[in-house]
Image (spheres, rainbow, N blue to C red):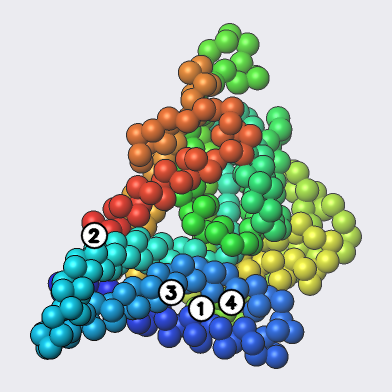
Amino acid sequence: MTELQIRLLEKLDEIAKQFADLEAKLLDSQILQDPNQLRDLGIKRAALLPIVMQFQKYQAIAQQIDEYEQVIKANDEPEFVEMACQELPDLQGQASDLLEKVTGELVTADDRAIGSVIVEIRSASGGDEAAIWAGDIFEMYQKFIARHQWKVDLLNMAGGEMGGVRHAVFNIRGEGVWQNFGYESGVHCVKRVPATETQGRVHTSTATVAVLPEPQKVDINIPESDVEIHVTTAQGPGGQNVNKVATAVHMIHKPTGVEVRMQESKSQQQNRQKAWLLLRTRVYDIHQREKDMERAQQRSSMIGSGGRSERIRTYRYKENIVVDHRISTSFPLQAILEGQLQVMVDALISYDKAQRLSAL
């Protein structure tokens, strides 16, 4: 057995114990009364289940292999020795195949275990057309979300003067959201004739997308003393007050300088809760990126840096295609805009999995 296989089996044994712990927690009467904990633990269990099932099959076959090897070594009964010699190669092949399969499941388990993300869309270069384009991306994602029946909660949105959105922030919850949405971070470029163009010329506009996993409270603790909070009246376009009641919440995380403004809800309490959610997510993202930099090239999970300045995709209206630059593959434009992203996402997952496996 190779050193890699030994490390893999140790990791699988650790995951089996985590799975048993999750099973026990899901039977706890207090957790059964908490829908949020129940959902989060259920998503983590679902992420580990395929790995544990394959590992259990591997363990059963490994035990058979050990028994047959003992029979051959003892060499007491010729009939059993002959049978063991005949069946052993097939069992060893099955064990090898299972180990390879479970390794593939293992490298994406952490992604599948994250069931809540924050998505931020911002118009970038291109003026009014960039805001219209950011709005198109927002609509594309809403259709993709609906196909998966995930729960979505709009946290913040500002419209463009000619339509679309200048920026939009929303929370998505459900099984597989990080694995499916994590590849969307980066610059989305569109080449088309804008509705505002009178000469029929093709323009290039961009929008940026950031996808951040929502941290659990145990992942990051932000003391209230580190946060400066201001409550004001909600602001409309041009800065005018849109109501007389102070419901808008402005938070500043003093150690990092991260700022969050929330005014979508008419309730100050709801805006405060949403602001805390977004603040924790952004601060957590900063901490994670610092850790990633420390680990240098060890992080390959997002196929490239996944940074907001990295161009990941170009939507070419003239050719009616979408090109994902990370895998150099094109997809039908209209289908993608209608939220049919799964084929592209599956291709990205497969490529990413191969990259991770090669790095083991």
Which residue is under mark 3? 52
Which residue is under mark 4? 41
SS label for mark 3 = helix
Sequence-first tag of 2 and 4: 4
Residue at image point 60% right, 73% down: 42
Which of discs 3 and 1 lies nearer the camera? The answer is 3
Type of the residue with mark 4: Leu
Could you tell me how far apart the alpha carbons at marks 1 and 4 are, in whole angstroms?
A: 18 Å
Type of the residue with mark 1: Ile
Which residue is under mark 2? 359
Q: Quadrant of residue 70?
A: bottom left
Could you tell me how far apart the alpha carbons at marks 3 and 2 are, in whole angstroms?
A: 22 Å
Could you tell me how far apart the alpha carbons at marks 3 and 1 are, in whole angstroms?
A: 28 Å
Can the viewer see residue 3 in this picture? no
Which numbered dot is residue 220? 1
Sequence-first tag of 3 and 1: 3
Residue closer to the observer: 65 or 310: 65
Which of discs 1 and 4 lies nearer the camera? The answer is 4
Could you tell me how far apart the alpha carbons at marks 1 and 2 are, in whole angstroms?
A: 29 Å
As displayed, is residue 322 above or below residue 341? above
Residue closer to the observer: 161 or 10: 10
Sequence-first tag of 4 and 3: 4
Type of the residue with mark 3: Val
Q: Please indicate whether residue 246 sits to the left or right of residue 98 in the image.
A: right
Q: Label 4 near label 2: C-beta < 8 Å? A: no
Q: Label 1 near label 3: C-beta < 8 Å? A: no
Could you tell me how far apart the alpha carbons at marks 2 and 4 are, in whole angstroms?
A: 29 Å
Residue closer to the observer: 277 or 90: 90
SS label for mark 4 = helix
Which of discs 1 and 2 lies nearer the camera? The answer is 2
x, y percent for residue 174: 63, 62
